[in-house]
Amino acid sequence: SAVISQKPSRDICQRGTSLTIQCQVDSQVTMMFWYRQQPGQSLTLIATANQGSEATYESGFVIDKFPISRPNLTFSTLTVSNMSPEDSSIYLCSVEDGGYEQYFGPGTRLTVT
Amino acid sequence: AQSVTQLDSQVPVFEEAPVELRCNYSSSVSVYLFWYVQYPNQGLQLLLKYLSGSTLVESINGFEAEFNKSQTSFHLRKPSVHISDTAEYFCAVTMNTGFQKLVFGTGTRLLVSP
């Protein structure tokens, strides 16, 4: 299974600022995903990021708010822009291994004050 | 579109008791099913999966789940729980027609007490 790391593991940010979260995988993968887990809730897919193409966003999520980069097959970033307290969540990246399994990173716990 | 229902938001049990966490799904096409576990302050770990073949699947730590197509269910069971099983458990589904996104249920918090 893929080993996934995320940076930062947690952060406290002020309203109106932006934070970029990094996701690094120890092997080359085609598909990477970004999820949001709001306090006490389930995971919601933000977008799918394939290398060499624009990210595909789910309903309710837009590129201006959550720009994503996927420069190569082992790395991706998610930026949370112009943050508000409602953006306080855990943000997780995951990868699909080609066998329909997804493996998740440890998450980035974001608090917006 | 797929959807997943986990009716129990929280299940309290005593150590060494059996437990069942319920998961029902809705889909117009065939699906693959997963259970993920999230221990406190950790990321998600794949617990077990059903892709094809035997409808009863097992994990290495004693959990099992049975895919029931007629009842559209994939309930998770363990005959004897440990304190260390205390965690959030998420059921998830994806279509089996090429990779599609995972759709998660709302999760069930398993609380094991001595």
Image: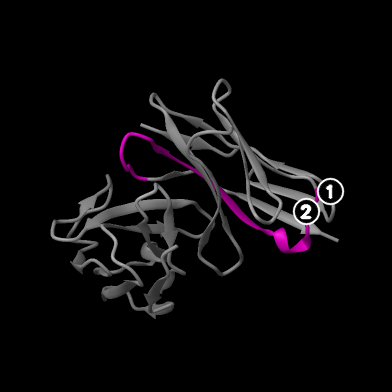
Asked whether B94 or A97 is in front, the reply is: A97
Report x, y in % for residue A108: 42, 71
Report x, y in % for residue A60: 28, 48
- Up-down relation of residue A40 to residue B43 (above or below): above
> Left or right: B75 with respect to A38?
right
Q: Is residue B87 magenta?
A: yes
Report x, y in % for residue B11: 72, 47
Q: Is residue B51 magenta?
A: no
Give the CA separation, mark 2 to mark 1: 6 Å
- The dot on residue A41 is none
Quadrant of image for the N terminus of chain B: top left
> Left or right: A105 with respect to B78?
left
Q: Residues within 10 Å of mark 1 (few under 14, many from 20)?
A: few
Report x, y in % for residue B80: 80, 50
N-terminal-most mark, 2 or 1: 1
Residue under pointer 1: B17
| Label 2: chain letter | B
Q: Residues within 10 Å of mark 2 (few under 14, many from 20)?
A: many
Quadrant of image for the C terminus of chain B: bottom right
Residue under pointer 2: B81
Q: Point out the residue furthest to the front here.
A: B53
Query: Dots 2 and 1: beta carbons under 8 Å?
Result: yes
**Bounds of the magenta segment:** B80-101
Kind of residue at disc 1: Ala
**Residue at 26% in and 74% down:** A18
